[in-house]
Amino acid sequence: MVTQSQSFQSPRSFKKIEEEAIEHALAGRWEEAADVNIEGIEQDENNVGCLNRLAKAYLELSKYKDARSLLKRALELRPCCAGQPQELVSAKSVRLCTYLAR
């Protein structure tokens, strides 16, 4: 039985989380984008999209070491393949983060 002090909070769908994360990023709300992508990673720790979006938010927040770590993890989950621009961008981003984190 549920009392008044308890509430039903159904977990948000992963699609809603992705949509909100993208919305925050497009509006330049990087802290909020990071928070929502963390929520997504809590639901699916191997979601490459969330890892990449969180890394982008961290880059914008000057958290270069954290961004580099997430990008490396994303590349481990989906190794860089020739001809696939998003993976090539991720590989370049890892190098950029390495440089900025010095």
Image: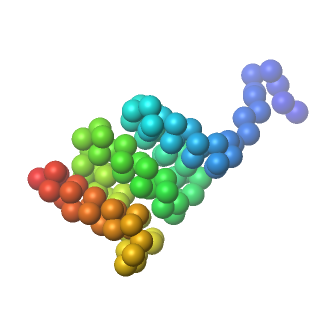
Q: How many marks?
A: 0
**Residue shown at 77% from the left, 33% from the top:** 8
Side (left or right) of 65 relative to 71: left
**Residue shown at 30% from the left, 40% from the top:** 60
Q: Quadrant of residue 74?
A: bottom left
Most extreme residue toward the bottom is 82
Q: Is residue 66 above or below residue 31?
A: below
**Residue shown at 49% from the left, 57% from the top:** 49
Note whether residue 73 is visible: no
Q: Is residue 89 above or below residue 32?
A: below
Most extreme residue toward the right is 1
- Towards the viewer: 6 or 54: 54
Where is residue 11 drawn, in percent x and y?
69, 42
Where is residue 68 drawn, in percent x and y?
28, 57
Where is residue 51 drawn, in percent x and y?
44, 55
Side (left or right) of 22 relative to 75: right
Name the quarter where the N terminus is drawn: top right
**Residue shown at 82% from the left, 25% from the top:** 3
Q: Quadrant of residue 94?
A: bottom left
Note whether residue 17 is visible: yes
Where is residue 40 drawn, in percent x and y?
55, 49
